[in-house]
Image (cartoon, rainbow, N blue to C red):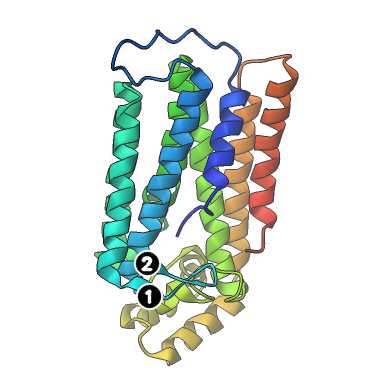
Amino acid sequence: MEVRHGIQSWVLLLMATALSVRIPELPPAGVGDTLPTDLRTSQQRIAEITEMIHVASLLHDDVLDDADKRRGICSLNAVMGNKLAVLAGDFLLSRACVSLASLKNTEVVTLIATVVENLVTGETMQLTTASKQRFSMDYYMQKTYNKTASLISNSCKSIAILAGHTAEVAMLAFEYGKNLGLAFQLIDDVLDFTGTSASLGKGSLSDIRHGIITAPILFAMEEFPELHAVVDQGFKNPANVDIALGFLGKSSGIQRTKELAMKHANLAAQVIESLPESDDANVIRSRQALIDLTQRVLTRNK
């Protein structure tokens, strides 16, 4: 599960401009001090750090899932082996930490460190889920936040903090990233059932074949309780995959997942509309782009 590579950078750079209501002077860098003197440069560094953490998480995720494809291309672990793939991910994380430390902002360092903690927590939740928890939408959404939305939400908040905004504005930035990330992942859940293997990262039906229960199946189980027994048995038997898909097709699981994604996308758009007013043309354009992005997340097909 992930937000598509590159989108984070666009969101963060747009957020940086969207929040350009008041840009304070950063203190000048001293001898040996690597703190960027330009606010935009430091915010761009957050975008770079976010991408490094994101790619590292994908490399590790592919090893854990034993995936041989990533967006239709051979995964690194399939080409170079698990050990090198893990080391590559570790290297990216280490470079992200070095770059993060150079910003010399304790609050931002704490936020991004929390992201890494959330990524590990989310993966652990997915790997060690007890039966009762697997049937909980609340548990699933928490796992989804940890694995997908934490990175973009905390990075958006970091952009606001670096610009010296109030706690209220920083929280609005956080909420935008959180809801955008959740909407994105919910649509990813849908596409795993409705998309094609050529357009999806690990191929259609990847999640269910790995025993990962996502929103469409959770909603289907609410309508057809007998699906619980199939989920409990697991999906190593292809027949169980077919049975689950049969129940899903009869249910409103796909539609309800789309509706939940729309709810979070609309919440993200409302956050942007709640930001302090500005008559700056660049700020207005960036905010509109962030709002437009919430709808594009809903209509994408890959």
Residue at image position (34%, 40%) is 96
> For the residue marked with disc 2, what is the amino acid?
Asp
SS for dot 1: helix
Image coords of residue 281 (percent x, y): 75, 20
Q: Is residue 271 left or right of residue 74?
A: right
Residue that badge 2 annotates: 62
Q: Nearer the viewer, residue 5 or 253?
A: 5
Image coords of residue 222 (percent x, y): 48, 67
Image coords of residue 240 (percent x, y): 42, 87
SS for dot 2: helix
Residue 197 shows in this picture? yes
Q: Please tell me which of labels 2 and 1 falls first in the chain.
A: 2
> For the residue marked with disc 1, what is the amino acid?
Ala
Image coords of residue 238 (percent x, y): 43, 90
The numbered disc on residue 78 is 1
Residue at image position (28%, 61%) is 86
Quadrant (top left, top right, bottom left, bottom right) of the N terminus: bottom left
Residue 222 in the image: above or below residue 284: below
